[in-house]
């Protein structure tokens, strides 16, 4: 038996995938843009098994690519093509909720727990795990933390990083860092957990996390609103933030995006005719029944209409209508994918700069790629707008990618020039390493390399990701 096959001693033969057919789903990313050739897929069921596998991989000189739900959009969970010998280490079997304490407003989940299951576990004890995005039914806690995921509620509760109290991590040499405490206050030196959050598996393997919960939402109001421009949307955003309600989501969508959703979506119903150039999906909430949330929504939208910031609005009348609005948003990436090839971006700018960002990008796109079709959709409440340039109908992906190769660098440069980021929420993975080389502060890069060398001197943890 060779040393790779002997890993079955640790996890059992059923959890050591060696055949090409079994490995295939782990060898390609969600978008189908990145493919690798892992020698095996390892599926440990406990932290001790992860630790033992990491030690054995070190002895074998095998690189490790951690994988969660494999919904990442930067090619992080797939081995690099032509990279070093590697295995994929899937956390899917570490899927227990170890503890939940509503009095502490905390929950301890293993890395392989699906995000939606953690949301449900919190709801079952009258608490809220607030992060929310389209892939939450598949993405896992370990992947969520390793990419520092954002989503539609970042403006209210922050990115994944802000929801973490403590972590358990298997280091590149196999030792287990148990920092799984649930205390809110701990100033005993460096907050090491923040190295692994957003680390995309390059510094260690997250095996469990103590997560922060919130009180359950007792009232929620959701609206689908037509606005004449991003400037009008920004004014509406300020008005809502000042309304006395908690604004928990504020998404800006160009009409073209809604047209793609209407065309390719299954079971989607547009709440308004698609006659406006821009739409906003917004949600306000309160943790107590006595807050007059409906009146706040109606009054605020009414005042915005009088000011010309809103031209039409549909407020959800039922839970089904509310979920229908969010289904449009959540299904949008899939609808866009069905519409044909597009080059996407993941930029953020200060909220106040969103209109200028969009004006500049639209002008540049029209000048340089008049045949392309621009789309913009995103979490305007936190300044994270995803701009894409879609191929003209009928054009294949390679042709479009080569013709509009400068599109992504252009959008990144505009965002950075406005004080923003070229990587807002999807991470760096393989797809944005070139942008790191261009835009990341050189001293920050030097410090990142120092940390990487200190923790993973042999470069075996997810090689070819994050660092250019
Ligand atoms: C339809 C759709 C919508 C999306 N919308 C959003 C959105 O609104 N906001 C957003 O932020 N993202 C979004 N994403 C991206 C993606 O869902 C997130 O990045 C998510 O956090 C990835 O989780 P995952 O479990 O699928 O991770 P994976 O894709 O499996 O892995 C992502 C990265 O984390 C590493 N990793 C995974 N698990 C571990 C672990 N336990 N320890 C160490 N490293 C690990 C991997 O090596 C890889 O580098 C969307 C994706 C899709 C498909």
Image (cartoon, rainbow, N blue to C red):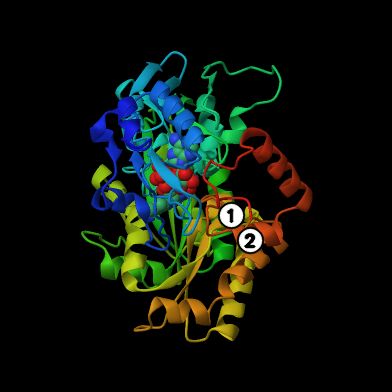
Q: Is mark 1 within 8 Å of ligand 1?
A: no
Q: Residue at x 53, y 59 (%)?
A: 431
Q: Residue at x 45, y 46 (%)?
A: 86
Q: Residue at x 40, y 59 (%)?
A: 35
Tell me the distance, in whole angstroms, between the alpha carbons under discs 1 and 2.
9 Å
Residue 215 appears in the figure: no
**Residue at the farthest right position:** 443
- Which quadrant holds the C terminus? bottom right
What percent of the width, then of the height, locates residue 52? 43, 25
- Which quadrant holds the N terminus? top left
Q: Nearer the viewer, residue 391 or 302?
A: 391
**Which mark sits nearer the N-terminus, 1 or 2?**
1
Secondary structure of the residue carrying tag 1 is: loop
Query: Relative to 349, is 393 on the left or the right?
Result: left
Secondary structure of the residue carrying tag 2 is: helix
Q: Tag on residue 423?
A: 1
Q: Nearer the viewer, residue 262 or 22?
A: 22
Characterize the local packing of mark 1: few (<14), some (14-19) or many (20 or more) Cα atoms within 10 angstroms: some
Q: Tag on residue 435?
A: 2
Q: Residue at x 52, y 86 (%)?
A: 370
Between label 1 and label 2, give the one nearer the viewer: 2
């Amino acid at each position: 038996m060779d040393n790779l096959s002997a890993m079955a001693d640790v996890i059992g033969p059923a959890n050591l995938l060696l055949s090409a057919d079994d490995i295939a789903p782990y060898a390609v990313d969600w978008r189908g843009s990145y493919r690798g050739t892992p020698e095996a897929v390892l599926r440990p069921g406990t932290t001790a098994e992860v630790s033992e596998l990491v030690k054995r991989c070190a002895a074998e000189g095998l690189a490790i690519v951690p994988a969660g739900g494999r919904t990442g959009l930067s090619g992080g969970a797939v081995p690099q093509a032509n990279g070093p010998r590697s295995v994929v280490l899937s956390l899917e079997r570490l899927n227990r909720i170890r503890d939940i304490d509503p009095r502490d407003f905390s929950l301890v989940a293993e890395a392989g727990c699906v995000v939606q299951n953690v949301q449900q576990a919190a709801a079952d004890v009258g608490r809220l795990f607030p992060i929310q995005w389209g892939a939450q039914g598949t993405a896992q806690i370990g992947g969520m933390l390793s990419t520092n995921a954002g989503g539609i509620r970042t403006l209210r509760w922050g990115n994944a990083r802000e929801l973490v109290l403590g972590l358990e991590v298997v280091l590149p040499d196999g030792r287990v860092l148990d920092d799984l405490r649930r205390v809110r206050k701990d100033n005993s030196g460096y907050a090491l957990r923040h190295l692994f959050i957003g680390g995309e598996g390059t510094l260690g393997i997250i095996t469990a996390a103590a997560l922060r919960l919130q009180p359950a939402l007792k009232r929620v109001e959701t609206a689908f609103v037509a606005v004449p421009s991003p400037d009008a949307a920004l004014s509406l955003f300020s008005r809502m933030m000042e309304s006395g309600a908690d604004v928990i989501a504020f998404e800006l969508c160009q009409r073209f995006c809604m047209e793609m959703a209407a065309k390719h979506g299954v079971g989607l119903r547009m709440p308004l005719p698609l006659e406006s150039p821009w739409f906003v999906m917004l949600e306000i909430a309160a943790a107590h029944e006595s807050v007059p949330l409906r009146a706040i929504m109606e009054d605020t939208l009414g005042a915005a209409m009088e000011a010309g910031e809103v031209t039409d609005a549909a407020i959800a009348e039922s839970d089904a209508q509310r979920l229908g609005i969010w289904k449009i948003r959540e299904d949008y990436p899939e609808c866009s994918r069905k519409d044909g090839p597009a080059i996407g971006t993941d930029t953020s700018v200060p909220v106040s700069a969103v209109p200028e960002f969009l004006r500049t990008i639209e002008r540049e796109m029209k000048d340089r790629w008049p045949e392309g079709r621009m789309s913009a959709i995103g979490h305007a409440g936190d300044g994270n707008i995803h701009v894409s340039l879609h191929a003209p109908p009928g054009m294949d992906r390679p042709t479009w990618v080569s013709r509009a190769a400068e599109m992504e660098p252009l959008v990144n440069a505009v965002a950075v020039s406005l004080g923003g980021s070229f990587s807002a929420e999807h991470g760096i993975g393989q797809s944005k390493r070139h942008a790191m080389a261009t835009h990341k502060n050189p001293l920050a890069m030097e410090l990142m390399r120092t940390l990487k060398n200190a923790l993973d001197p042999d470069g075996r943890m997810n090689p070819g990701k994050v660092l250019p």
